[in-house]
Amino acid sequence: MNSRTDMPAASAGNDDISVVTKGGMLVGLALADAVAVFRGIRYAKPPVGELRWKPPVAAGAWRGLRRAVEFGPACLQISSSPGSVYAHRPSRMSEDCLFLNVWRAPRASDAPVMVWLHGGSLRTGDPASGMYNGSHLARKGVIVVTVNYRLGVLGYFAHPELTGESPHSSSGNYGLLDQIEALRWVRDNIAAFGGDPHNVTLFGESAGALSAMALMTSPLARGLFHKVILQSGYLAWNAELKQACFGQASAESNGMVVAARLDAQDLVALRAIPAKQLTERTAAIGFNPRPTIDGWVLPRQLIECLDRGEQAPVPMIVGFNEGEMRSMRAYVPTLPATAVEYETHVRKIYRDLAENYLACYPATNIEESALAAARDATCGWSAERLARAHSRLGVPAYLYFFSHHYPAEDAVHLKAFHASELPYEFGRIGAAEGWPELWPRPPDDARERTLSEAIMSYFTSFARDGVPVAPGETAWQPYHDDRAFLEFLDTPRPGNHLLAGAFELHEQVVSRRRAARTQHWGINIGLASPPVPCVEGSVRLRERPLHV
């Protein structure tokens, strides 16, 4: 029994933890406080052999009882960088990885459902990690589902031959298609667990949030979820399937380069490469997994969908962390040694926007300004852009800023780092197991537990009825013209006009890149940015009016 992070109840009868899905009967584990967990539920057939790089095929039915007590293997992946705070080696990995896990709320009946998409840059991630233990959220009356999906080259590889064999003339979005298939499984089966298939909240962090953003714009996912929580996502540019754009090659061209580097003459040869070898070799040559604008799964760039008001009109929570880049220093280049050098460098990059940049990120503390600029140009701009677009669409959007920190973080200069909210939203304060080895653990005290309870309450109440509420805590106002937001410091605190001026600056930069079409905005990261296109010679984009 793999019970690394869930404590079984002292005694539990199988009658209390069996469910009958459309595929057949499952038997799970009874946990403390009447929560039950069902692990390793297959939602699609093994994506191996001829099914490698094809849309997932729904899992078939079975006879008799199927035990759902072991987590399924994570998708094959490379190891995290040595010394990374996120370093975690899944105990089991396989190309056959399309499994999900369900935590059932006590006495669940028509309970709201929360479907979690893990982060990991679309390269790594393991839903069996104790960080994603859904038992505490389930105790607040929700059903929690965590999903495996294909990663790296197995999930995001495009190639002309793959496009040619597809009835939809598509390739490259297999990880997204896995997530959509998992949502279909939820629609068809979650009622058996006491969940309401008409009240599903999709939530994810980092690459999980990026995926959820993509699914908000995918016609294939429409109607499969009804609310969304986006944590530290990035509204990035994605490669077009067949044509170069924004100074970058097409997804198919990238795929052909990868195939050539692998000495694979055709699709048969590519599918014959052992999955572990394929994963390691493509990572070594720098394959960058990301969604593809293919006209079927994703009709157009995500930001264009926002401008046109085409995103799913579902209530949204969206936000980011104060120290996003403290644990991702690769996004910050070598810093100038002096204030004069810093300002000179900024003026070379930002040209006529340099004064605005320096007003937001002054030379008084070069390191802090560089970290803040990289944060705001990625996760910050994305969160505010999504909230603004959703609000103009007439749909509630709630913006947050997670700035809480504690001594173990401060000691290693990781104040409110990327993903540091996860232990709070999953109720992991004080947990003995399930932590990445180098993760600075929050202290197990009343302050940390109170903040965790508040965040879990805001998120689960939002999943219930679309309004985030926490007993005894401040009201969370939706984002409107007053640009309301909630800051998670030691306690939740309301505010308006978060980081005034920063998002306007980065919107101008992205708009110029979109107009010039010579740069993509995935490299809009402060001091690591190439020179921003001048206004001269390009038409500045303006947001189009959004329509319901």
Image (tube, rainbow, N blue to C red):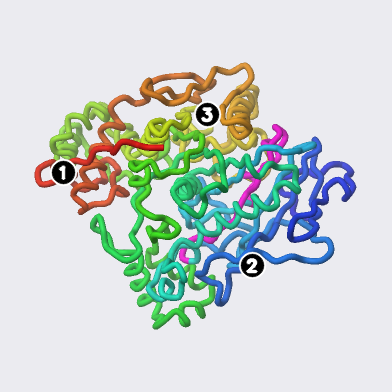
Residue drawn at 29 percent across, 47 percent down: 521
439 up-or-down from 72: above or below: above
The earlier-in-sequence mark between 1 and 2 is 2
Q: Is residue 249 left or right of residue 296?
A: left
Would residue 380 be seen by someone viewing this image from the given angle?
no
Q: Which residue corresponds to mark 2?
A: 45
Q: Amino acid at mark 2?
A: Lys
Residue drawn at 62 percent across, 68 percent down: 46
User: Counting other residues with Cα less than 10 Å from the Cα at mark 2, is it few (<14), some (14-19), or many (20 or more)?
Assistant: some
What is the distance, in whole Å, between disc 3 and disc 2 at their CAs? 46 Å
Would residue 344 be seen by someone viewing this image from the given angle?
yes
What is the distance, in whole Å, between disc 1 and disc 2 at their CAs? 49 Å
Q: Nearer the viewer, mark 3 or mark 2?
A: 2
Q: Which residue corresponds to mark 3?
A: 407
> Farthest residue toward the front?
548
Q: Give the x, y percent position of residue 183.
A: 60, 52
Q: Amino acid at mark 1?
A: Val
Q: Give the x, y percent position of residue 466.
A: 57, 31
Q: Give the x, y percent position of residue 420.
A: 52, 37
User: Counting other residues with Cα less than 10 Å from the Cα at mark 1, is it few (<14), some (14-19), or many (20 or more)?
Assistant: few
51 up-or-down from 537: above or below: below
Q: Secondary structure at mark 1?
A: loop
Q: Which residue corresponds to mark 1?
A: 539
- Magenta residues span 128-153
